[in-house]
Amino acid sequence: MQRPTATASSILAATFLFATPAHSALAQRPTAQRQNRPEIPAVARRDTICFAYYTVNKGVLKLTAQLYPLQDGESRAATLAIKTGDAWKTIATARVTEEDYKNYRQDKTWTAHFRVEKWDESRSIPYRVTALNGVAAYEGSIRANPVGKREIVVAAFTGNSNQDRRLKPDLIANLKAQDPDLLFFSGDQVYDHTDHLGAWLLFGRQFGEIIKDRPMISIPDDHDIGQGNLWGAGGKVSTNSAGDDGGYFMPVEYVKAVERAQTWHLPDPADPAPIERGIGVYFTALNWGGISFAILEDRKFKTGPNGPLQLKPKFAPRPDWVTNANYDPKALDLPGLQLLGARQEQFLKTWGEDWTGADFKVVLSQTIFSYATHISHGNRLLADLDANGWPQSGRRRALEFMRRCFAFHISGDQHLGCVAQYGVDDWRDASVAFCVPSIVNYYPRQWLPLDPPARSVDGPLPNLGDFTEGFGNKLTMFTYANPTAFPAPLTNLAASASGHGVVRFEKQTRKITIECWPRGVDVTQPGAKQYPGWPITVDQLDNYGRKPVAWLPEIEAPAGITTPVVQVVDERSGEVVYTLRARTPRFKPWVFSEGSYTVRIGEPPARMTILKAQRSAKP
């Protein structure tokens, strides 16, 4: 790992407004409980379209426009046009949706969804969405696929807390300067448990200016869909707003409306069958700029802790917290508990083996796959079952599939920016992970282990190196952004460890550079500093850091293929050991046990050479 220098760190303190304890109370919710809620402003009719967001994948454009509420008698028709020369050409039409959120205000969805196939990805094209018979218009640009760019830049965000309703000109100015090719919002875009429409419109006013001109991935998390934490448990009903018994607390119509607003524009789901109660799924893959992204729903199938474990009051004051040292981490990993669920595990496996048009593999999810903090809002926790270090068996299966394709991991949620590396059997033998800091961080968490690392890592901060976290999982911490003050004033959001992440994928060298920028820093100024320990540069191969045992004979790609895809299959088990796009035509595969292997090399799907019964040899 290469480690240039960087700046100061932090976090803040907060309270969350949870949903009411019973659905029937939503319509009568007291005004006092709705304080700090985003009002839906009255806008001029020409401004009825708040913002638009899109993705392009394999020649399919999907674009959503979010509107302010329409009035009775107004047209529900919307159009999507592109500019050809000096003229606008309509390419799609849609009817504005009016599904009911079933919340206390009886909001409707007010979205227009456009799908255009056979999209030309080779050029940037201005677009315009119109409504109200052309009175309202909103313009942006569909970017050309940057497949020819040497460096692909991803900007990543999480946690847009309701404690700061202001617009974010500082962040937008920095993003314009950094000019990312893709935006990733990993969750909690909205912190309003019963007011998604108003808060999503506010999100559009805050970020629409940067979103309108580049593809955007957004995946909703717990606060988006109306509860304190989310263990989706396959879609069942949760009986409380904390969500700890698993499932969804808000009415199913609310959950569907949130997911429709935030995820319809993503590429079509990999496995579209709905879960319980007709709740949809959106886990999918996106190939953009030669980077293959797996977009996961790491909350939707996860088991809730209040039920199978019955932790309260044995280990902690609440079912998801472990605070009593007299616990066995292995006892928490009961048979049948789910993390990603079988469907997403199969998706990860299939996605990881398909390198068509890809130089990197990247997993995008709501949260990190370990317990990577110690202090939560002033409470020292030994483990937190909201983190994806639990259940351990599900974590292991996910990381096995991720490291087989050398996948880098970007996530959010934990209110603590960090760069860490997962361990499956040993430290540093699986993916490197970047958990980005919150946009506005009002619930402080800290990395503050009680014991020293098993092996230290050099860096500007204490407590860096190899650790065993509260679930017994191996985790290597390379850097983190603890708070310097909490609560921190809104005039100094950097003191709260608020900020955003930037990841640069350099396709020729296969290096990944990870940046973590504090709020309030002007990235265009000479000497602008990141949080301490950033930036960090890792190699693509670091994402499967397992030590080889033996090597296979050197192989060569078919003529004319300079960066072939290589796949190694263990002939005894039939399992894929790994799949990778090599940097040169010649490649000497390594393996982790002696035996006989099948090796495929070339350009999928047609130009692949298959070499069977390749015997391994120790060095």
Image (cartoon, grey):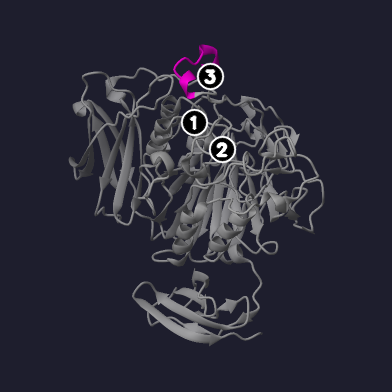
Q: Secondary structure at mark 3?
A: loop
Q: Residue 169's mark? A: 1
Q: Secondary structure at mark 1?
A: helix
Q: Position of residue 176 (x, y in %)?
A: 45, 41
According to the picture, the residue beneath numbered tag 2 turns out to be 522
Front tag of 2 and 3:
3
Q: Position of residue 416 (x, y in %)?
A: 64, 41
Q: With respect to residue 160, does 529 lie above or below? A: below
Label 3 crowding class (10 Å Cα cut-off): few <14, some 14-19, many 20+?
A: few
Among numbered discs 2 and 3, the one appearing first in the sequence: 3
- Classify the position of the N terminus by image quarter: bottom right
Residue shown at 44% from the left, 27% from the top: 202
In the image, which residues are magenta? 23-34
According to the picture, the residue beneath numbered tag 3 turns out to be 36
Residue 482 visible, this angle: yes
Q: Residue 378's mark? A: none
Among numbered discs 3 and 1, the one appearing first in the sequence: 3
Position of residue 184 in the picture relative to residue 481 (left or right): left
Among numbered discs 1 and 2, the one appearing first in the sequence: 1
